[in-house]
Image: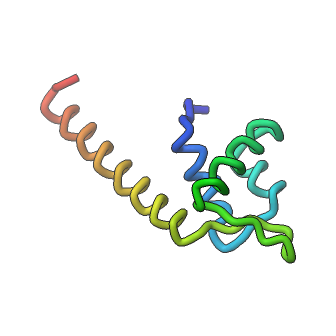
Amino acid sequence: MNYRDKTDISATILEVANGGASKSKIISIAFLNHSSSLQYFRMLLKNNLLVYQKEKRMFKTTPTGIQFLQLYHLMNELVNENNNLSSIHGAT
């Protein structure tokens, strides 16, 4: 498995929670342990990227979280384009 930074893990959590997901589903799909998942949940909730719906007992990505995902995917596209151009031109 490749190294994942905080942004990658946050994006994975938000993607899983888009539409609603239980804590156990998010932890399983994002390959997190319980203690690290708590840190991510706190951070994403604090920054209004994720909400917890008590009545449904699930997390859901907020509109702000969806904006984060859109920017995250755009950034990855741009980085991949630059990497492809570098390899074409022989730059490292």
Residue 46 quadrant = bottom right
In the image, residue 19 lies at what x, y percent?
66, 73
In the image, residue 85 lies at what x, y percent?
19, 39
Residue 48 quadrant = bottom right
Q: Residue furthest bottom?
A: 55
Q: Residue at x 53, y 44 (%)?
A: 8
Q: Residue furthest front?
A: 46
Tell which of 84 and 7 is nearer to you: 7
Relative vertical location of residue 84 with respect to residue 44 in this rendering, above or below: above
In the image, residue 67 lies at what x, y percent?
45, 65
Would you say 32 lies left or right of 83 here?
Answer: right
Q: Residue at x 23, y 41 (%)?
A: 82
Q: Residue at x 78, y 49 (%)?
A: 28
Would you say 9 lies left or right of 28 here?
Answer: left
Q: Residue at x 56, y 35 (%)?
A: 4
Relative vertical location of residue 79 with respect to residue 55 in this rendering, above or below: above
In the image, residue 92 lies at what x, y percent?
23, 23
Tell which of 86 and 66 is nearer to you: 66
Would you say 4 lies left or right of 59 here?
Answer: left
Would you say 54 lies left or right of 62 here?
Answer: right
- Total marks placed: 0
Q: Residue furthest left?
A: 89
Report the colour scheme: rainbow
